[in-house]
Image (spheres, grey):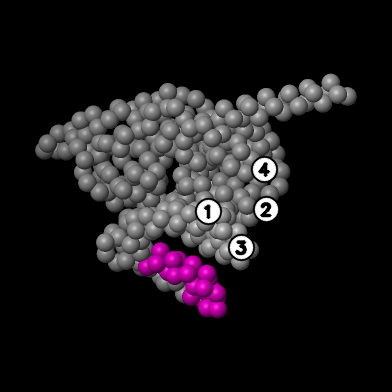
Amino acid sequence: MKTLLYFLTLICFFTTKAQDRYYGHPSNYPPNEFTVNTGYNFDYKMTGIMSFRGQRHPFVFYVNSADGSLGIKDDDMAFMLARPVTNRNEKFDFAVLIPDKGTRVYATMNDPEEGEQKICYTSKRSLSAPAMQLQFAHAETFHRFMQNATKRPVGNHPAFGPQTLYTGEMNGKTFKVTMSKRGAPVRITPAHVGFLCGVFADDNRRKNRYITKFEMSNGVKIEMHSFSKTNFIWTASGYTEEGQSTYNVESMTNNQERLKEISENMERIRRNMDYSNPDSIEMAGLKMMIETQRFNAIKSGHPERQISEADAGVLINRKARILDKRKECKRLKEMGDKRGEAMCQQQLKRMEERFQEMYNRYINVR
């Protein structure tokens, strides 16, 4: 019996050590530069199916594990996610989406007078499509979702093994996220790499895991079939930047309907606010500012400048964590724990500084 326990202990030890090779260890792959003419490097390839409005679209995405950037070669997929409005004389070449930096779309235009021209459209925002804005470059949103989600085991994935389905709400919307129970043998620097599916650093389990399926209440579904090593390089040379782009999906959006939706969101925020609760008032104020920013962006003729669902979700979750931290500091003070209170106040200050930096970036734009 002792021998059996000894070997089981060894197995657990070496399994934990194996996991430690990936979780908490950043990728050593070179990140991509956000310049027009450069070489883009990707060390993983992600394949699967995207379903939307009754149509199924196979995809191949190239992923950089060091910065979470995404490379797209497929014309149809680029059109859905990142491609600006184009004309008949323009041929799509490549698109790269870098979280927190933006998107570059490369195309070749055959001008009747000037001949072939290589052009690059640039946007400061990545993943503009309203149905697909949610990203996990920031951990707060997803961790909060997992803490509150209901979960149940589901069938095995052909490539990733046993899975768990998490169902819950994120930013007021219902999501179903299926994750492999196995650890992902992939080192990543951001908290998440891929597009909705992909690899996520699970701080609760202390291991990197595969997100194999992502389902939204609006009918968008991403299913990942594979996530494999590659060494894909796409080189951009001779391209001329054409300035800020207007995304295809936004050009098709009826702005009046969007403004109506924003107004309804504001009314719902007012209706649900608890005027007797200072925290509720503060959170409602932030949500109102987010909707106001979106309203002003559309009214100014720049709908592409609306804060994304992902960034809004990060702001809201950071505010929620600040409110919780304030309560924690207050409890420590009431307990007379001066040392604990001092540490808590230091943490609170750092959280508020990070929140304010992001707030200034997306909401308080001067």
The secondary structure that most of the magenta stretch takes on is: helix
- Number of the front mark, 4 or 1: 1
Identified at 50% across, 44% down, the residue is 196
Image marks 4 and 3: residues in contact by CB distance under 8 Å: no
Indicate which disc, 4 or 3, sits on the residue closer to the N terminus: 4
Task: Determine whether 153 is above or below 148 in the image.
Answer: above
Q: What numbered label is drawn on residue 164? A: 4
Is residue 362 among what the camera can see? Answer: no
Q: Is residue 161 magenta?
A: no
Q: Residue furthest bottom?
A: 276
Q: What numbered label is drawn on residue 336? A: 3
Give the Cα separation between the discs numbered 4 and 1: 37 Å
Where's residue 68, x and y in %? 43, 38
Indicate which disc, 3 or 2, sits on the residue closer to the N terminus: 2
Which residue is disc 1 drawn over?
343
Q: Is residue 270 magenta?
A: yes
Q: Amino acid at mark 4?
A: Thr
Looking at the image, residue 240 sits to the left or right of residue 210; the answer is: left
Q: Residues within 10 Å of mark 3 (few under 14, many from 20)?
A: few
For the record, the magenta segment spans 268-292
Q: Amino acid at mark 1?
A: Met
Image marks 2 and 1: residues in contact by CB distance under 8 Å: no
Task: Determine whether 217 is above or below 274 in the image.
Answer: above
Which residue is disc 2 drawn over?
150
Where's residue 343, x and y in %? 53, 53
Indicate which disc, 4 or 2, sits on the residue closer to the N terminus: 2
Q: Residues within 10 Å of mark 4 (few under 14, many from 20)?
A: some
Give the Cα separation between the discs numbered 3 and 1: 13 Å
Identified at 18% across, 33% down, the residue is 116
Q: Amino acid at mark 2?
A: Thr
Task: Determine whether 298 is above or below 36 in the image.
Answer: below
SS state under label 1:
helix
